[in-house]
Amino acid sequence: MNIEDLTPPERRLWEAFPKGEPVDLSSGDPAYDDLARADHWGHERTVRAEVLVALLVGAVEPQPGQVAAVRLAGARVTGSLNLGHAEVHVPLALTGCSFDEAPHLYWASMNSVHLMRCRLPGLIASGTRVDGHLWLEGSRISGGLWLDGANITGILNMSGVQLINPGGDALLADRLAVEANVYCDQGFTASGEVRLPGARVGGQLIFRGARLHNPSGAALYASRLDVAANVFCDGGFTAEGEVRLRGARVGGYLSLVGAKLSAPQSTALNADDLAVETDVYCSDGFSAVGAVSFAGARVMGQLSLRGALLRNEHGTALSVQRLQAEELLLRTAEPIRGIADLSYARINLLRDDAASWPERLQLDGLQYETLDPPLTARERLDWLHRDTDGYAPQPYERLAQTYRALGLDSDGRSVLLAKARDRRATQSLPRKIIGWLQDVLVGYGYRPFRAASWLVGLLAFGTIVFSLEQPAILNEDDHPHFNAFFYTLDLILPIGNLGQEGLFAPKGIYQWIANFIVAAGLILGLTVAAGATRALSRE
């Protein structure tokens, strides 16, 4: 490039480059310097993109002892800044500049790039390697920011960035690799899809206070994302459209405290198969319109939904199916509006609140070691009866086992009795009749001392019957004294002899009554003995 062809502002930049000195073309008038008026800036503020390219690829040698750099502020950049596949060894720092065309940095090797508070109709940096920071703070980028396959050894700073590409990719960062932190905070907004599938972040990923808008699809698509430290989607984070974290891995904790997610008739948060090394916080004002799913997720610490608002009336509002977590804190601000699916989850400690139970649950296969609070069997049975899939034996067995582990045997038996009764409703009519008799007589064996009441009634019945109709004496030569009470008691007792049963023999219908008393006494007596044995063994 011939230096004689340069305009005055370009010549200033050319001469400042060897020492890395900044060139500021702004007027000092905030109204005139507004990037929205960049089309009205004159030649005194215009720099051709080809001049920037020439400087960046070595048209001018650095001054010995100085760090050469392109440092420009307040300029309108015309033409195409095309550095595709270029080797750039000097920093590029543009502040408050407006681009007529989207810069092309694809597969370039850059030193460090600062495009702060700039206005760009797009930025294509697919496959770019930046040995340093990529700083886009406060910039407005329409038409899409492409960072797919890029590699940044320092920080990616998009604080305050506005990405505008409705219906398309606002940020395309598939397989992006950043060795330090990624900042999408301090007013970061995106209209269009933010894509981070397969991206790797060596530090923290910060979406604190970000506002994402793509209601027709995914607001944040970050499946298989790998973050070495923490992920922050809190501090006023909002997303209109799905947030997809399926198969993502977080080396620290995931914070969605106070986040507002909205994807009606769809999945507001898809965190299926997510792996988090510590805790997940969907709490303290977190709200989701649409499904929230942690199916198959693995959380080494706590998954907290304390104070959350979940709503998906026509389907599953919360799914933790097959979740593995040390603790699940399920104390939402109000009852979950929709189905809560806890089936086949494995949780060490389940903390919930009866006041926030959803009307519909799925509990089959749920495994837990401890419930907090345990509540009474009556209250917990109400919890089980909310299962939309109807009767399944496993939830009753798991709850009874938990009560027994806590030493609450009576509550455990109440649960197992409820299990037998609910199972009866699914059986054929003959089995229902048999089951009803078992329930009435001995509570399916879980109320053994109910049999004692029947024994007393049986004794009273026999005493009355045989008082009215004394059995015949077996040996006419003897004249024993007959006692209806002791005779009936002798019939009832399966062992021992009170001296009455062997001396008298009823006839006709009374013989049938005596036989009934003998059989019933045997069955009821064994039931009472079994219950007493269990009670003594527990003592």
Image (cartoon, rainbow, N blue to C red):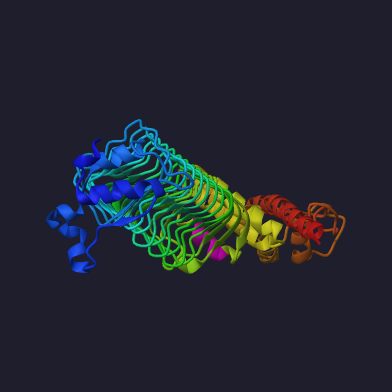
Residue found 24% across the figure and 40% down from its top: 3
Q: Report the predominant secondary structure element of the magenta stretch.
A: helix
Residue found 71% across the figure and 54% down from its top: 527
| Total count of labels | 0
**193 and 516: which one is in front?**
193
**216 and 318: which one is in front?**
216
Magenta segment boundaries in residue numbering: 378-384
Q: Is residue 151 magenta?
A: no
Is residue 458 visible in the rendered image? The answer is no
Above or below, 531 against 250 in this view is below
- Quadrant assignment for the N terminus: top left
* Residue 452 x/y as whole percent: 70, 62
- Quadrant assignment for the C terminus: bottom right
* Residue 262 x/y as whole percent: 31, 56
* Residue 316 x/y as whole percent: 38, 51
Above or below, 109 against 192 in this view is above
**121 and 350: which one is in front?**
121
Choose top left, top right, bottom left or bottom right for residue 55. Answer: top left
Is residue 391 visible in the rendered image? The answer is yes
Choose top left, top right, bottom left or bottom right for residue 453. Answer: bottom right
* Residue 321 x/y as whole percent: 48, 46
Task: Indicate left or right for 165 with 478 as reference.
Answer: left
Above or below, 531 against 99 in this view is below
Task: Indicate left or right for 310 with 98 as reference.
Answer: right
Residue at the farthest top position? 85
**197 and 63: which one is in front?**
63
